[in-house]
């Protein structure tokens, strides 16, 4: 079996940020697995258990804590419970109802309601424990739960970024945080969204929410998001401001609103002039490639696109010792897919993501060198966006390569597998791509 080192490194790298959560996941899985442990013992006495092991609480938040009996009682059954909370007082810092758990005849579920009443100075761990259960039942292994009472304002919801673009469709990520740090949701958390009145784009005219104006952060995850789809472009209706809706117990994070430019399908028609290679420093410093022979554009390089919306022709007036070694002077493109990729050259951990449109070119020199040639159909992606002064940029990413000079280490290290071109292409796109910026002429 052949192992792709880049894919392996990428997987381990992405898992690194979740190491602090692994122990919590193991404990949660153990708790859920133990819930039905009595089914595998010889003791068939019905049990009473809480249904979840952990909750969070803040000021003005009310949480529901279900309690479940294995079998329906024939008469009314009550179970007392105890709340332990160091330095917190019932009726002052929190309230809980009802005063005891009750299973009415024919019902196997009752619910406690725990509410945070005031600001607490620091995070405090509470516990809710079942006391003695009546004859005919016994306490199960889930006879207690823990509740993290967080300091007010410490649990927030925020967009990952303050601005992005909407091509054909996009998934906009949000993050759950406790203070400055990511916080894993203890249960599935549904998040609502509102269209800010500043928006010029109209819902169900210029864009739509295919899953409704809501998103989901799944249990044990720190991130979720919302899907948005483009419908049409219209002059003067190209801005969408999306705001995270208020939620009980949560405060706005650093970026509670995101500005979205309504773009629609990529339209690169026109002429673009070369500006710079965006990730040369990243390749040399972070990835340790030899960049002394990097393939770069030259002043005066231009590329012109005609056609659309899915099929384009291009004319490339590029230096043959630079980007002209990859792009023939004339070529055709066919739209393949939209893809969300990391901008590794930019700061942040994880780095920001953007949606690029991938195209299949009829012919590219995948040796990516002015000294050797191997022409075949190949893929690259593009994205347009606005600069701070309103200038329009076109970013082109090259990653479908079999390099012989610049980035030749990929071949030497066995990172490129001709028998798995798609896997190879996507691995390079994650870690060792080349990205170039052009500006509209």
Image (tube, helix red, strand yellow):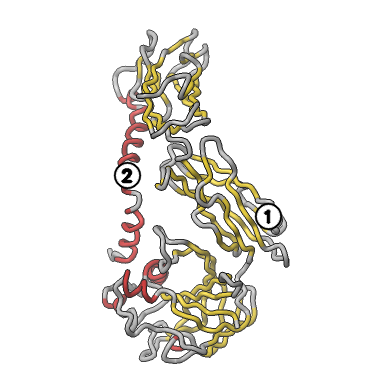
Q: Inspect this view and state whether residue 109 appears.
A: no
Q: At numbered mark 2, what does the secondary structure look like: helix, strand or loop?
A: helix
Q: At numbered mark 1, what does the secondary structure look like: helix, strand or loop?
A: loop
Instruction: State the quadrant of the N terminus.
Output: bottom left
Q: How many numbered marks appear?
A: 2
Instruction: Pinpoint residue 71: horizontal percent, then vertical percent.
Output: 44, 17
> What residue is drawn where x is 65% and y is 50%?
195
In the picture of the structure, the residue carrying the numbered disc 2 is: 22
**Which is more N-terminal, label 1 or label 2?**
2
Instruction: State the quadrant of the C terminus.
Output: bottom right
In the rendered structure, are the residues bearing label 2 and label 1 in contact, judged by CB atoms less than 8 Å apart? no
Please state which of residues 284 and 413 is positioned toward the viewer in this rendering. Answer: 284
Q: Inspect this view and state whether residue 132 appears.
A: yes
In the image, is residue 296 above or below residue 259? below
Residue 172: quarter of image? bottom right
> What residue is drawn where x is 50% and y is 81%?
275
- CA gap, disc 2 and disc 1: 42 Å
Residue at the front extreme, as displayed = 121
Position of 203 compared to 253: left or right? right
Q: Residues within 10 Å of mark 2 (few under 14, many from 20)?
A: few
In the image, is residue 292 above or below residue 50? below
Residue 142: image tag: none
Residue 302: quarter of image? bottom right
Position of 306 compared to 279: left or right? right
In the picture of the structure, the residue carrying the numbered disc 1 is: 198
Instruction: Pinpoint residue 125: horizontal percent, then vertical percent.
Output: 36, 30
Between circles 2 and 1, the one closer to the viewer is 1
Please state which of residues 4 and 1 is positioned toward the viewer in this rendering. Answer: 4
Instruction: Pinpoint residue 180: horizontal percent, then vertical percent.
Output: 41, 47
Q: Residues within 10 Å of mark 1 (few under 14, many from 20)?
A: few
């Amino acid at each position: 079996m052949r192992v792709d080192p880049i894919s392996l490194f990428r997987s381990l790298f992405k898992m690194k940020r979740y190491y602090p959560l692994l122990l919590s996941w193991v404990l949660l899985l153990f708790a859920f697995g133990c819930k039905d442990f009595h089914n595998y013992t010889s003791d068939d006495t019905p049990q009473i258990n809480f249904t979840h092991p952990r909750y969070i609480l803040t000021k003005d938040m009310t949480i529901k804590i279900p309690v479940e009996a294995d079998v329906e009682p024939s008469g009314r059954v009550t179970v007392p419970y105890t709340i332990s909370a160091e330095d917190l007082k019932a009726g002052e810092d929190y309230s809980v109802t009802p005063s005891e758990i009750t299973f009415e005849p024919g019902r196997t579920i009752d619910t406690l309601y725990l509410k945070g009443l005031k600001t607490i100075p620091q995070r405090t761990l509470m516990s809710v424990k079942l006391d003695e259960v009546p004859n005919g039942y016994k306490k199960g292994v889930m006879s207690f739960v823990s509740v993290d009472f967080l300091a007010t304002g410490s649990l927030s919801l925020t967009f990952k970024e303050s601005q992005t673009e909407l091509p054909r469709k996009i998934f906009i990520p949000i993050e759950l945080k406790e203070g400055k740090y990511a916080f894993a949701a203890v249960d599935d958390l549904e998040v609502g969204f509102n269209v800010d009145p500043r928006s010029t784009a109209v819902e169900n005219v210029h864009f739509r929410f295919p899953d409704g104006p809501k998103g989901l952060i799944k249990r044990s995850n720190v991130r979720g998001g919302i899907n948005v789809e483009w419908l049409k472009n219209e002059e003067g209706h190209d801005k969408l401001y999306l705001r995270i809706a208020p939620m009980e117990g949560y405060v706005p994070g650093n970026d509670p609103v995101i500005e979205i430019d309504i773009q629609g399908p990529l339209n690169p028609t026109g002429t673009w002039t070369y500006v710079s290679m965006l990730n040369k420093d990243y390749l040399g410093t972070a990835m340790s490639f030899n960049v002394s022979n990097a393939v770069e554009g030259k002043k005066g390089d231009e590329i012109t696109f005609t056609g659309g919306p899915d099929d384009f022709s291009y004319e490339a007036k590029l230096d043959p010792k630079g980007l002209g070694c990859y792009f023939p002077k004339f070529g055709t493109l066919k739209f393949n897919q939209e893809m969300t990729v990391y901008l590794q050259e930019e700061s942040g951990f994880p780095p920001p993501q953007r949606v690029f449109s991938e195209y299949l070119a009829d012919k590219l020199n995948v040796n990516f060198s002015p000294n050797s040639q191997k022409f075949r159909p190949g893929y690259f992606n593009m994205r347009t966006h606005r600069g701070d002064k309103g200038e329009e940029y076109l970013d082109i990413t090259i990653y479908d390569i079999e390099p012989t000079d610049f980035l030749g280490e990929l071949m030497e290290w066995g990172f490129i597998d001709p028998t798995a071109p798609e896997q190879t292409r996507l691995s390079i796109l994650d870690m060792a791509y080349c990205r170039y910026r052009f500006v509209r002429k």
